[in-house]
Image (tube, helix red, strand yellow):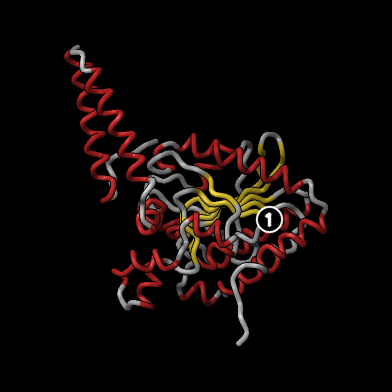
Amino acid sequence: MEDVTYTLEFEKPLRELEKQLTTLQKVSQESKVDVSSEILAIEKKIEAMKVEIYSNITAWQRVQLSRHPKRPYSIDYIERIFTGFEELHGDRRFKDDAAIVGGPAFLDGQSVMVIGQQKGRNTKDNLNRNFGCPHPEGYRKAMRLMQMAEKFKMPIITLIDTPGAYPGIGAEERHVAEAIAVNIRDMSTLKVPIITIVIGEGGSGGALGMAVADEVMILENGYYSVISPEGCAAILWKDRAAAPLAADALRFSPNHLLKFGVVDQIIAEPAGGAQRDYDCTAATMKTAIIVSLSKHAKKDLQQLLDTRYARFRKLGVFADN
């Protein structure tokens, strides 16, 4: 699944080595010349450079990785982790929102409800899915599916990948803030385990409207923030070009989020990002989901609800002057 035609600025030295490796392998196959020692040397350089680059990326570079156009999206993970997925549509009030996909599925034979935020792969698909920015009807559809899951005692798994809820006039007219607020309120009392994974971008209330969970995980190159770095830069620095500074100031990378208790677990990605190996990333995610569901299924209902409520009440630091 790896795509080397799209290269981030900080990845260019690695791509040059990979091109050299491809050229050598082609020469070896076509001319029958033994260049195995040269190939081995470049492979070692590539692995060393991967460690050097990806173990020291900045917060802004991590944001760029989270937005990589070839990064796996919700449907890619649903296809690899679950079986028998049946997508359900519509909020029964206005219309269907393609920015959110969801429906019942099986996780190793167990019935679950999986709901994900979905971006598009090309211009047409992105227009259909609104670039992964849900409308209010998307959040109402998600809640309809969650209430269905509660009725049939199915654990809920949500996949977060959005720069934020859609801020357009139509969304405001249909009360997007109210739809997100209702989801936050009602998710806190759903009587089934809820697991959330931030698979890419976790932007503001657009993410939180599907992330009031018993356990929140994040992929290694995702971010989860009250605002995008560009939005923060526009407010504080009056210049969106200051986004790298804002990314550092927001402290939204996975290690910071784990330290502050915003997320409970970081899920490792292949070196270079999830886009390099969809299957490997999905397999790691699946294991994490199964372990988490097993843990929360052992709790009695009141303990489940009390722990979920307490988890979010303790976030942040408040002081009275």
Q: Residue at x 46, y 53 (%)?
A: 222
Could you tell me how many numbered marks the image carries? 1
Among all residues in the image, which is located at the extreme bottom?
A: 321
Q: Secondary structure at mark 1?
A: loop
| Residue 219 image position (x, y, % from top left) | 50, 48
Q: Is residue 221 left or right of residue 143?
A: left
Q: Nearer the viewer, residue 321 or 19?
A: 321
Q: Is residue 64 left or right of residue 221?
A: left
Q: Residue at x 29, y 49 (%)?
A: 8
Q: Is residue 95 visible?
A: no
Residue holding disc 1:
214
| Residue 242 image position (x, y, % from top left) | 31, 69
Rendered-image quadrant of the C terminus = bottom right
Q: Residue at x 54, y 68 (%)?
A: 205
Q: Residue at x 50, y 50 (%)?
A: 199
Rendered-image quadrant of the N terminus = top left
Q: Nearer the viewer, residue 222 or 172?
A: 222
* Residue 319 picture quarter: bottom right
Instruction: Identify residue type, mark 1.
Output: Asp
| Residue 23 image position (x, y, % from top left) | 20, 27
* Residue 318 picture quarter: bottom right
Q: Is residue 259 left or right of residue 46?
A: right
Q: Is residue 31 visible?
A: yes
| Residue 48 image position (x, y, % from top left) | 32, 36
**Is 207 situated above or below 87?**
below
Q: Nearer the viewer, residue 53 or 19?
A: 53
Q: Residues within 10 Å of mark 1 (few under 14, many from 20)?
A: many
